[in-house]
Image (cartoon, rainbow, N blue to C red):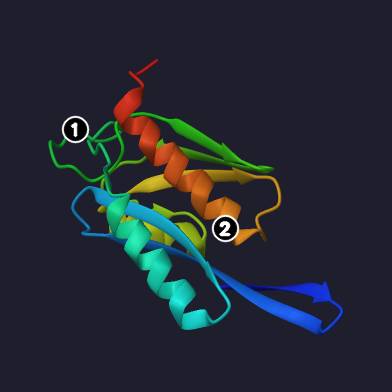
Amino acid sequence: WRQTQRKTKEGNIPSFSTLAVVGDENGHIGIGDGKAKETLPARDKAIRKAKLNLMKVKRACASFDCACSELHSIPFKVTGKVGSVKVTLTPAAQGTGLVVGSELKKILKLAGIKDIYSRTDGKKRTTFNLVKACIEALKKTNLEEEK
């Protein structure tokens, strides 16, 4: 969660915003954000929105080193960009694992992806944009064809 404050004559008025990601570890994932004056209502709003924004993530075995038929990676290389953060996800061979940062590892586990490489550019400290860029890249697995 993130805390911000608004300055008024009466003093500082705090506001909390949270980001929630839900998934079934079988190719479905959702993201939601919530804002409130307290942390718990903000978290509840974020979880409710995440459950309403579920989407399917296309999984496959697309690495050149691997010839299995299991759904353990993504079908092709995808890129997502939000703000200054750019996330590029590349398919990997079976047994490679999640070669990504700690925040992205949580998201990709919820999506059911077991083997993947990633490259992140921009300011990675802005966690909200990092997570949104990863979700944007995962959305493109359903939209784009292999180039």
Looking at the image, residue 11 sits to the left or right of residue 67; the answer is right
Q: Camera-side residue: 24 or 94?
A: 24
User: Could you say where residue 144 lies in the image, as x and y percent from the top left?
Assistant: 36, 22
Residue extending farthest front: 9
Residue at (46%, 40%) from the top-left corner? 136
Residue 98 at x, y percent in the picture: 39, 55
The residue carrying pointer 2 sits among few (fewer than 14), some (14 to 19) or many (20 or more) residues within 10 Å by Cα, namely some
**How many numbered circles does the render carry?**
2
The C terminus lies in which quarter of the figure?
A: top left
Q: What kind of residue is marked 1?
A: Ala
Sequence-first disc among 2 and 1 = 1
Location of residue 21 in the rendering, given as x and y in whole percent from the top left corner: 38, 61
The answer to whether 101 is drawn above or below residue 138 in the figure is below
**Mark 1 surroundings: few (<14), some (14-19) or many (≥20) residues within 10 A:** few
Numbered disc 1: secondary structure: loop
Q: In the figure, 16 relative to 46: above or below?
A: below
Please identify the quadrant where the N terminus is shown: bottom right
| Residue 130, position as x, y percentages in the image | 56, 52
- Residue 117 sits in quarter: top left
The residue that mark 1 highlights is: 67
Give the amino acid at mark 2. Answer: Phe
Residue occupying image coordinates x 28% and y 58% = 51
Please give the residue where the numbered disc 2 appears in the rendered image: 128
* Residue farthest along the left direction in this orientation: 69
- For the residue pair 138 and 60, the one nearer the viewer reads as 138
Q: Is residue 93 visible?
A: yes
Residue occupying image coordinates x 50% and y 33%: 79
- Residue 15 lies, with reference to residue 92, above or below; the image says below
